Structures are given as structure tokens and as C-alpha cells.
Amino acid sequence: RDPGGSSQGTGPFLLWVLNYGIICPCTLERSLHCPHLNLKTHFYSLLYSYTEEPEFALNRDYFEEDFRSHARGRRWIELTVEEQRAYVMRLLDALEVTDRDKRLKVARAILYLAQGVFDECDTEVDVLHWSRHNIFLLYDMGIFTALLELLSMEIDNSQACSSAVRKPAISLADSTELRVLLSIMYLMVETIRVQTEDDRPEWIAAREAFKNELASPLYNGEPFALLLFTMVTKFCSMNAPHFPMKKVLLLLWKTILFTLGGFEELQEMKVRHRERLNLSPLPEDSIKVVRAMRAASPPASAMELIEQQQQQKRGRRSRRPLVKQDSLDTYNERDPFKNDDARDEEEDPEDTDSGIEGEVDPLDRDVIIQPPPPPPPLRPPTERVNFPKGLPWAPKVREKDIEHFLETSRNKFIGFTLGNDTETLVGLPRPIHESVKTLKQHKYVSIAEVQIKREEELQQCPLTLGEEEVEDTPAEMLYLGMLPNLSQYVIALLKLLLAAAPTSKAKTDSINILADVLPEEMPITVLQSMKLGIDVNRHKEIIVKAISALLLLLLKHFKLNHIYQFEIVSQHLVFANCIPLILKFFNQNIMSYISAKNSICVLDFPHCVVHEMPELTAESLEAGDSSQFCWRNLFSCINLLRILNKLTKWKHSRTMMLVVFKSAPILKRALKVKQAMMQLYVLKLLKIQTKYLGRQWRKSNMKTMSAIYQKVRHRLNDDWAYGNDIDARPWDFQAEECALRESIEKFNSRRYERNKNGDFAPVDNCLQSVLGQRVELPEDFHYSYEMWLEREVFSQPIQWEGLLQNP
């Protein structure tokens, strides 16, 4: 909305948000739910629970109490930069005191600076400006390193951990120190990460230095992200139930996002990597293609078809001309879902299969067709539907697809094969020549295929090919640090995802993720209960958002760095039941989840500290905000679908798991969310299992089949829509996963074990050289050396003549 509050011009802006704002985890979700809420402020509102609102004033009071003695009547924004630096240095010295309460007061004062000294600001823009200024100042003065030491102390605080374990109910008060430290660190990471046009040169240099600092193993010999992963595993093992998991996960996500890069940086790295390997350029930019894609009309459910037939029999509504459903970005602001259902009911069942891609003209969308005589249409019917000019994706063909096609053709026409030879076409008819030429025109060699081939060569010839040069990229250093405890990290993240999923039921043995949202005193009024209920649901949604984005980023970056790094993370996810967990997540009323209103915009930071707080009522909380859709939940759903695609792509046994778990009806219901990107990944998952669902399913879901054809990339010789010779292919999950695991272990052994090529190392067979080697002995051996000599040497009879006898 514009500053005046009118909705003019909202359509293009909403389209931009839809196509850009949720395109990937590197871009934070955009919030349109409140006219006075600036998009940038949503970075900070995620961090705080509504129950933390009283602490904003506490931070301000501690700061002003200390600052009054230093500035003597002046305000922070009136000081010069040198005076501000001197005061920050004073706070830094005060952080090193031994008194825990004094340290907490100083940390709260620093948090108030990071929050933008909001009591001295009149608008939210001023708060953001001073927050950015102060955070770069804090980083320059070395505050982050001091906070890191304090965070390590709090993590290792066994007294706090044991106290939390014994407590029957954990609340906000148990994690006060950790929440303050993590909040400052999150604000520093997120603010420095985001680049703006008016950044000073010293800020740009500080951003690069901070990025390298976070990615390097400077913190106890490991990257900063591993410390946060350790907090996650410690929490999930019930050893530290007071850890504020939402803040830890948000900070971990932003740290990974900052150090490894978002999807646009990932795309640039992929282009550069292909150039280094002398591979052909990418056929298109996938991010741009998805941004330009339009949503399709969802397929009608069986219940809707029955209602439609009954209405036609009763003659309550006349049959209307073919009108395609609009996409999410041109929704009717009054009640889009109700409108969509009515249109589904009014469409003729014979026409539904043809109405996949077109869009309704916004001028015509609210025209109601009356009984005859009908009103004249605004345009001729032929102009109302914008048919696509072509398929959005260029088709791809793998090398093994060409080999398989030639093998089949040679067996048919010649009677023998030539192995992997794709050049010799002697004896094959002319149409086969043309087919091979077309396949080679669309041949695509992925980076993963090159890496697998190179790894096979290194395994076969370890001595002749020599050592592999491994570049110390941030992804490589992170993988090296995660490798020893990778399975624990993955299982912990999935446990948290399960606990935060809306379909999960509370169990006595499940982990408590509400430690940093529940107040000390439980609500006693209806209004307080409603507010806490909204806060708890919002808390869970943010956790799901952070975990889904984190997992997707790790999978994407590890896949680019080396395919086997991606495969080991994927296999850990599969073995930890990630596939049924995601399907369970989607086995709900997904439209209700997408349109959930678990937010109170007047309590979001920084609006709540700048503006007058209106009186909250039960009616206003129940009505929620004016947003039609929750971008946070849409973002999470897209991420989870992409993770599911990553796990099952080119894996026959995992695809069969989708079939066994009966994912088709669950995924088909998700198509009702009319957002192009989400529909694309749902259709991809349906495409890979279509051939296993039977002819009857394909026959009764032709609209879905048409949508797959129009939106998903084609493999020229893929028979996904027909399901030929399915019975001939066995399904052995264990054999496929064991073979993959063997390749992964060989890769890790060759690349990361200290004793590389131990089987091929030369053997020293010189007696003097071997006896002259120094042997590392334990310290206590020197004290018991004489006893060892007496027991093992002197007291043992030695038969020297036995050496002279033949064996």
C-alpha cells in the first residue's frame, strides 16, 4: 500500500513480492500484512517473541542508567563518532567483570544500541538508520568477539544446564543471558550481511572481513556455525533444555546464508564452476524462469465435482463460458478462496482439462454471468486467455540417456551393441540418425557427473594421479567441521522440525521448543491466552522457516562443492525419516496454513517501541491482520518441497518411497495453493512417480498431467507419462543406498583421512632404520618401566636355540 493507505498500485507491488520476495532463502520473506510496517523491519520482528516486549524498556533503562553518568545530559545521537567509540570501549571493558548481573546489564545496554536507540527516534526509518550505524560501530570495536567468549561460557555453564533439567517448567527467565547475547549477534550478522546502496567504503570492507571471519575456523579451530550446531544437538539431547532454539536457529540460518551465499550467489558460482570445467553454459537462469512463471488453476477435487454435478441438476446456476482461474498474484481481496471454489463449481467438467495456463483479465474477473440474455463481454472470448508462447524450460538429455537409446536401437536393427560408443551409427536407419542428432543438441553435462567421473579416476589410480587440490571454500571448511557429527546435526534439526510442525501432536517424550516464548506467569485472562496462543503458533512457524531454509541452503551448497558431500547429507536425511516427515507436514489443510494469521503487527519490532500502543481486544486478535496470505508459511512450504525434490531426484528407491507413502493425494491437494513456484515443485514430485500410479490415476488426473507438461522440464526420452516396462525394474532400497554409501565412504576416506593411501605407502624393511624410530609411549610407562622389564623380559625364559631350528 502507498503511504496514504489506499490500495492503488498494489497489484504490481504484490506481483514483485510474489516473484522476488520468496524466490529463495537468500531473500527474506516480504510482509504486506500491515500498511505502516516497512519491509526492512521484518528482519528484526522475527527475532523477538511477543512475550519479550517488556524487555525492550528494560534494555533502554539499563543503557540510560549507565549512559547518564558518561554523557551528562546529552543524547546518543548527539555524540560525535569518537565519543561514541569511547563509550563502546567502556562497555567492552565492563563486559569482562566477574559479576554475572553486572555483565547482563552491560549486555542489555549493548543490545539497546544494536536495536537503534529507539527512545531517541521518531520513526521506524530512524530506528533502522541508527541500528545500522551502531552495529557497524560495535563490530569495529570488537564487540562480536567478546560476545562469542561470553556465549561459549554460557553454553558450558553446567550449573544452569543442570538447574534447567531439574525444573518441571522452563520459561523465558531461564534463558535471559543467552537470549540477550544471541539477539545482539543476530542483529550484527543480519545487518552487516544486507548490503544497501548508501553503504560507506569502510562498511563494505567490514562486511567482507566479517564474512571471512565467520567462515574461517577461528573459533576454537572451527567455523562459528559449528558452535551453533553444537547448541542444537545439546538442546535436542535434553542436556540444555533452556536454550532459546528459535534465536539459535535464526542465527545459524543467517550465518550460513552470509558465509556461503544465497541463491543468486550460488547461481554465479555455478556459472564460474562450469566455465572452469569447460562445460557448456546453463541453458537458462532458473531463478528468472521461475519468477516469470504464472500459477495454474488447481485441479478440482472429487467433492467439488460431486457438488458441481448436483448444482447442474438442480439448475441453480447457468453454465458460464470457459473462464480460467486467476493466479495468486491477482487475488480478489475480499475472499479469494471462496471465489475460487465458486469458479471451480461453475466450470464444466469437460472444460476443466483445457484450462491450465491462461489468466483472467483483471477487468473481467469480477463480472458475474447472469441468466440469459448474458451481458456482452468486455473483449472477444479469443482475447481473454493468454496462452504461453512456448515451454519455459529447455529440454535436457544425459549422456547415459543417449547410450541407452543407441543400445536399444542397435539391438533392434543390428542385433549387437557397441558399449558406450555414441558416435558410430553404421547400420542404423536415417530416423535414428536424426534422433541422435536431436538428443546431442540438448545434451547437458552436470557438474556432479564430472565430479563422479573424476572421483572414480582418483580411486582407480591414486598414485599416478597424485594428490587432489582441494580449494578451501567456506562450504568445504563447513563440511570438514560437520563431518564427524553430521548425523547428530541432521537428526537434531529434524527433531525440531517435527516438534514445530502443525500436524504434530504433543507427546510426553518430545522436546520442548517453547522455552523462549512461555512467560514466567501463565495467562489468567482470555486476552492474554489468545495473545500467547498466537505467539506460540508464530514461534513454531519461524522455527519451521529457519530449519527448512537452512537445510535447503546446505544441500544446494554441498552439491555444488562436491556431489558426495550432498549425497551424505541427503542419505542422513533419508535415514532419519525426512521424507515421511515432510509428507506429514503437508498432510493438513494447506490452504489454512498458507493463510494463517499468527501475527500481531502492532507488537512487531520496531513499531511497538516507536508508536503509541493501541488497546488490544479479543475481537482484534481474533480478526488478525489484513493480510490474505502468510508469506512466512508459503516460504517454508516451498523450501520443504525443494528439499523433497533434492532427496528423490534420480533415486529410484526413494521415488518408490513416495509411492509407498501415498504422497500423490497429499501433493495434489497442495496444488490448490495458486503460487507458481510452489506448484512447480509439487508437479516435479508428481512427475517422477506418475508412471507408478497406474493408468486409472493418469486418466482421472489429466489436468495435473497437462500442468506437468507445461511447467516441468522435459527429458526427451523420458516416458514419465506412460509407465512402460515398469514391472521389469526391481526396487531394492537397501542395495541402492548401500552402494551409494560405499562410494561416499571411499570419497571421505580418500579426501579427509590423515593416513591417505595407507595401503600403497612404501614399507621400511631396514632393521636399523626401524629400530631407530622413536615410539610414542604413555607418560605412566616411564614410572613402571622396571616392572615391565622384570615381568616381560627377565622372568620369561628365552629359548635361543629355537632360532636355529627350521620352521
Image (spheres, rainbow, N blue to C red):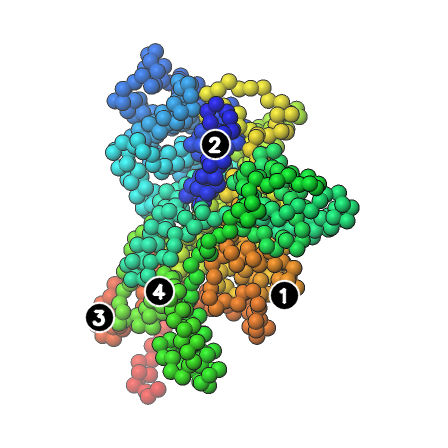
Q: Which residue is mark 1?
A: 694
In three-dimensional space, the C-alpha distance between marks 4 and 3, rounded to whole angstroms, equals: 44 Å
Left or right for 557, reference 4: left
Q: Which residue is mark 3?
A: 769
Q: Which mark is residue 707?
A: none
Pick the residue in front: 83 or 659.
Answer: 659
Q: Residues within 10 Å of mark 3 (few under 14, many from 20)?
A: few
Callout 4: SS: helix
Above or below — where is 157 with respect to 771? above
Q: Earlier in the sequence, mark 4 or mark 2?
A: 2
> Farthest residue in the right direction?
314
Callout 2: SS: loop
In three-dimensional space, the C-alpha distance between marks 4 and 2, rounded to whole angstroms, equals: 48 Å
Q: Nearer the viewer, mark 4 or mark 2?
A: 2
- Give the quarter of the figure containing the C terminus: bottom left
Q: Which residue is mark 2?
A: 9
Q: Earlier in the sequence, mark 4 or mark 1?
A: 4
Q: Is residue 207 visible?
A: yes
> Farthest residue in the top direction?
73
Instruction: State the image coordinates of residue 246 (x, y, percent, origin top left).
Output: 50, 38
